[in-house]
Amino acid sequence: MELTPAQVAALDGIYRQSLPQRKRLRADLDRLEAQLARAMARGDDSALALIDAVEETRARRNTLRAVMLFGMYRVLTARQRQLLSRLSSSPSASVK
């Protein structure tokens, strides 16, 4: 993609800046999903509140990821964005 050293540094900074919060949200989501599974197995009414908590946490995590990706996208030139789009839409792309 012919990234400049400044672009590499900017992309790395964007990634690292959100990493602690993304890790925390992933851990929160794992914990809440486990609690929800246990509550559902018991038939406990607390599952209703846990469903909301799980989905709220999932939404916050997805939003944070989208904001991170948008920040990274803004660092790229138009040509680099086109190349990235082609790469990520190719059948062999395994970017998640």
Image: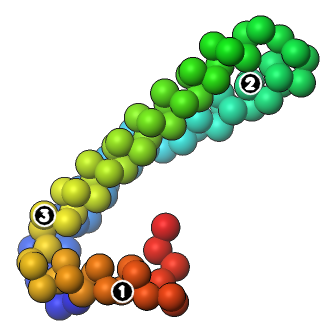
The residue tagged 2 is 35
Residue at horizontal 39 percent and vertical 39 percent from the top: 21
Secondary structure at numbered mark 3: helix
Q: Relative to 41, say whether 89 is above or below.
A: below
Q: For numbered disc 2, what is the local secondary structure?
A: helix
- Report if residue 24 is visible in the image: no
In which image quadrant can residue 5 be found? bottom left
At label 1, counting other C-alpha atoms closer than 10 Å, the crowd grade (few under 14, some 14-19, many 20 or more) is some
Amino acid on which disc 3 is placed = Arg
Report which residue position mark 3 lands on: 74
- Using residue 30 as the reference point, say whether residue 1 is left or right of it: left
Does 95 sit left or right of 71 as displayed?
right
Rendered view: 19 above or below 69: above
Q: Cα distance, mark 2 to mark 1? A: 39 Å
Q: Position of residue 79 (x, y in %)?
A: 12, 85
What is the quadrant of residue 72 in the picture?
Answer: bottom left
Find disc 1 in the rendering and name its residue: 87
**In screen coordinates, is 27 left or right of 62?**
right
The residue drawn where x is 28% and y is 81% is 84
Q: Residues within 10 Å of mark 2 (few under 14, many from 20)?
A: some
